[in-house]
Amino acid sequence: MGVNGLLRKVLSEVGIRPERFNLQWASAAEAPRFVKLITQFTKEIKELGPLGQAEGLSPAEAKARVQKAYELVSDRKLRMGFGNVSKALRQEGNKVTDELIAKTIDEKLTKTISSALGG
């Protein structure tokens, strides 16, 4: 729960358009939904262009920022904080929305993310 929200937050913080990541679930019985999801995501990525283009970054800078995002999500402190956020969200039950997830991640993890980024 919330991986999509966390990764979008991290990408945003390192200067990569969060629209470049999207995690959706589709079962084997949902072939039409799967095709729709992949088609839409492919269209959105094509519109953004190569990694870094929409962000105004050189290929080397885009690669460095993606590496920084990888290091950030590998950080033990952030993973533990995210585990606590996930636990708290599970207690909310069926009231959890994408907006609530994003808000909670923003409130609870921004300081950890900024600290890890040296800010």
Image: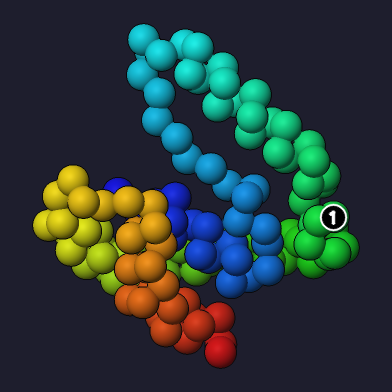
User: Residue 18: x, y in percent?
Assistant: 60, 56
Residue that carries the numbered disc 1 in the rendered image:
53
User: Residue 116: x, y in percent?
Assistant: 49, 81
Q: Is residue 78 left or right of residue 72?
A: left
Along the line of sight, the residue nearer the viewer: 21 or 80: 21
Q: Is residue 112 left or right of residue 55?
A: left
For image coordinates 59% across by 72% down, the residue present is 13
Three-letter amino acid code at the position of disc 1: Gln
Along the line of sight, the residue nearer the viewer: 1 or 80: 1
For image coordinates 26% across by 65% down, the residue present is 85
User: Residue 50: x, y in percent?
Assistant: 82, 46
Q: Is residue 80 left or right of residue 88?
A: right
Q: Is residue 90 visible?
A: no
50 to 109, vertically: above or below: above
44 to 66, vertically: above or below: above
74 to 97, vertically: above or below: below
